[in-house]
Image (cartoon, rainbow, N blue to C red):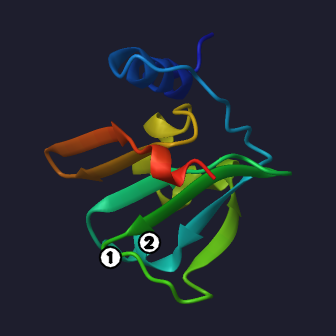
Amino acid sequence: MKDPNREHQEAICIKYKTEKVDSPNQFRVGISQNVRDGVLPINGVRITPQGDSTGWFIWAGEWSDAPDFFRPLHVVHLKDWCPTAIPFLLLPPGWRFQVAPKYEDVWFDADVRN
């Protein structure tokens, strides 16, 4: 049986004509606590993965440079924390997304690859 999340992720990569880079369930994203608070929009940016990190940073609302803004979270737990981000997880480094109700923007930004 095919994973519907995987199918949606692959469709996003096809839509934006980009390669797929996995984000294994046992790897981590950096995520802000405020994604659980209903703050919008949801934003994501992917840098080059290192170690057990997917390279994804996901936050709600405005970015913060506070040292404790992001916390590590295993990909498998995104279904509870931020299911909105799951469709974008196959996008490669350099890609960003922003989503809110009835709004989706996905784009490549070479300045964030590393």
**Which residue is situated farthest in the top direction here?**
1
Name the residue type under label 1: Glu
Q: Which image quadrant is residue 3 in?
A: top right
**Which residue is situated farthest in the left direction here?**
102
Q: Secondary structure at mark 2?
A: helix
Instruction: State left or right for residue 17 relative to residue 101.
Output: right
Instruction: State left or right for residue 27 relative to residue 43.
Output: right
Look at 47% across and 20% down and name the residue there: 18
Q: Nearer the viewer, mark 1 or mark 2?
A: 1
Place of residue 68 in the rendered image (x, y in percent of width and height, measured from the top left):
61, 87
Looking at this view, is 63 or 84 the one in front?
A: 63
**Image quadrant containing the N terminus:** top right
Q: Which numbered disc covers residue 34?
A: none
Look at 41% across and 14% down and name the residue there: 14
Looking at this view, is 73 or 67 the one in front?
A: 67
Up/down of 44 relative to 1, above or below: below
Place of residue 78 in the rendered image (x, y in percent of width and height, measured from the top left):
57, 53
Name the residue type under label 2: Arg
Q: Which image quadrant is residue 20 in?
A: top right
Place of residue 42 in the rendered image (x, y in percent of width and height, measured from the top left):
34, 60
Discs 1, 2 touching: Cβ within 8 Å: no
Looking at this view, is 10 or 81 the one in front?
A: 10
Up/down of 28 relative to 33, above or below: above
Q: Secondary structure at mark 1?
A: loop
Place of residue 2 in the rendered image (x, y in percent of width and height, measured from the top left):
59, 12
Q: CA distance from mark 1 to mark 2?
A: 14 Å
Badge 1 or badge 2: first in the primary sequence:
2
Look at 33% across and 39% down and name the residue there: 107
- The residue carrying mark 1 is 62
Look at 55% across and 60% down and name the residue there: 57
Up/down of 37 relative to 114, above or below: below
- The residue carrying mark 2 is 36
